[in-house]
Image (cartoon, rainbow, N blue to C red):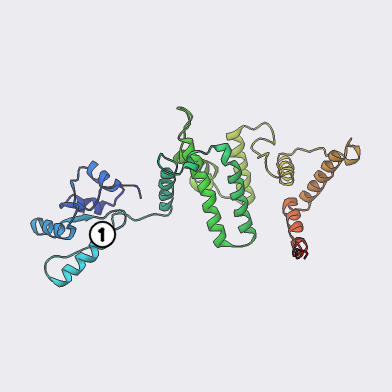
Amino acid sequence: MPAGLLTAAAWDVLRSAPVLTGTESAQVTAVRAAGVEVTVVSGGATDALLAATSAHGTAVWLAGPTGDETLARELGLRLARQPGLAEMELMYGSWDPPGARLLDAVEVMDRLASPGGDPWKRAQTHRSLAGFLIEECYEAYDAINDDDTDALREELGDVLLQVLLHARLAENLPEGERWNVDDVAGTLVDKMVRRNPHVFAGAEAGSLAEIEANWERIKQTEKTRTSVLDGIALSQPALALAAKILDRAGRAGLTVPLPSPDAQPDPESRLGATLLALVAHSRHTNLDPEAALRKTILSLTPTLTLPPPSPPSA
């Protein structure tokens, strides 16, 4: 969790007795900023902690980022050899809620993309990373199709890496254009709350179809779109793009005039019109043309094995 984000009980303990620690850290800085004096002990930590306990009745050791396991072990052995010398109690300063490791990921990315970090990441731009984002999304898609949840977990991490890197690079944009990962998350949170009034605003939750229709109405109000193309990723694969446009037009009550393949002036245009007609047919049969073609081409992979190379001639 962020430095200084501690439970009320932890703050009570820190303010009740002398506080010692083994190293400077962001946590130490935050505790000092709250008015608590913290003494850094460079050596003899066990003796220093026991001396403070003897003088004040209670002393607090603020563990460092690694948990200071060596100190805990040495202190435990000393107290076992000298019963009655003192009592040791381990207290957790905070409890990590779901999503806490995302903060670690943001911190690691910040270090990688800051001076002294990874030169490759610092040299990237949104445009140079665009292909990687698409590639990582496809790898996650493959894991879903393979029903490989372990691989999906890893691939989603790679997608998240791209999100974090894009957000970190945006912090280097000119003044007035900058944004960061909190802006990304904040925009997402606001959108989820707005578009789910049946969860956050007490609206009636009807059928799934009614919920989807309400989502579309809210989105239309937000975006004030004038074309079915607005908001569609035009760089997606052509079959998927055609299916998306026809579906969006159908939901808007628009009829799309399909070009006749026979009326086209060249082979490329005839092929395009033929493929579009097939996509339109797939929509009426509730089939995904992109998935159908993918399934068929991948079924041919056993026949695409290359023969072993011929042995070199004598």
Looking at the rendered image, the quarter that the C terminus falls into is: bottom right
Of 128 and 142, nearer the camera is 128
Q: Position of residue 36 (x, y in %)?
A: 19, 45
Quarter assignment of residue 87: bottom left
Q: Which residue is mark 1?
A: 91
Q: What number of labels is visible?
A: 1
Q: Residue at x 8, y 56 (%)?
A: 55
Residue 186 visible here: no
Q: Position of residue 140 (x, y in %)?
A: 59, 54
Give the answer, above or below, for where 81 lies relative to 205.
Answer: below
**Element at badge 1?**
loop
Of 98 and 166, nearer the camera is 166
Q: Residue at x 53, y 58 (%)?
A: 153
Quarter assignment of residue 175: top left
Badge 1: how crowded within 10 Å, few (<14), some, or many (20+)? few
Q: Which residue of the protein is positioned furthest toward the right in this rendering? A: 262
Q: Which residue of the protein is positioned furthest toward the left in this rendering? A: 55
The amino acid pointed to by label 1 is: Met
In this picture, residue 178 sits left or right of residue 21: right
In this picture, residue 21 sits left or right of residue 104: left
Of 66 and 29, nearer the camera is 66
Q: Which residue of the protein is positioned furthest toward the front in this rendering? A: 314
Q: Position of residue 13 (x, y in %)?
A: 20, 53
Give the answer, above or below, for where 174 lies relative to 255.
Answer: above
Residue 176 visible here: yes
In this picture, residue 53 sits left or right of residue 289: left
